[in-house]
Image: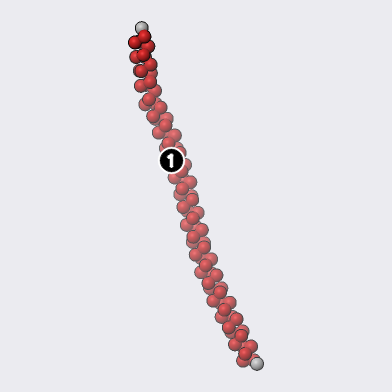
Amino acid sequence: MRRGNATKAVTSNATEAVTSNATKKCDKEMRQRLLQVMRQRLLQAVTSNATKKCDKEMRQRLLQIMRPREMRQGNATMNEKK
């Protein structure tokens, strides 16, 4: 009987060890995946903010470029009316 109990104990310990290693491996993979996702989201957030800032600057620049043209066209229209 002892031999059977010892075998069960060894088998149980081996199963726990294998499961534990699998869990550690799974945990490691999950941590790596989570870090990858977090890095990706952080990069997207930074890129998004940079894009918004760039878009804002570009819109302002376009407005600056267009304003003088509109003023010239407005003046030309006013001169034509005279």
Q: Quadrant of residue 18?
A: bottom right
Q: How is the image coloured?
A: secondary structure
Q: Quadrant of residue 4?
A: bottom right
**Image quarter in which the N terminus is found:** bottom right
Task: Kindly identify which residue carries mark 1.
Answer: 51
The percent position of residue 60, horizontal first and vertical second, equals 42, 30
In this view, which residue lies farthest toward the right? 1
Q: How many numbered marks, from 0 up?
A: 1
**Residue 14 versus residue 79: which sits nearer the camera?**
79
Q: Quadrant of the C terminus?
A: top left
Q: Is residue 51 above or below residue 65?
A: below
In this rendering, position of residue 81 left or right of residue 13:
left
Callout 1: 10 Å neighbours few (<14), some, many (20+)? few
In percent of width and height, residue 31 lies at 52, 62
**Disc 1 marks which amino acid?**
Thr
Instruction: Identify the residue at horizontal 47%, vertical 57% (top origin).
Output: 36
Q: Tell me which residue sits at (35%, 21%) in the image.
A: 69
The picture places residue 42, in percent across and down from the top left corner, at: 48, 50
Residue drawn 53% across and 72% down? 22
Q: Where does residue 57 sit, x and y in percent of width and height?
A: 42, 33
Q: Is residue 2 above or below residue 14?
A: below
**Where 77 falls versus 25 (above or below)?**
above
Residue at the image position 42 percent from the left and 37 percent from the top: 54
Compared with 40, 48 (above or below) is above
Q: Secondary structure at mark 1?
A: helix
Q: Which residue in the rendered view is the most extreme toward the top?
A: 82
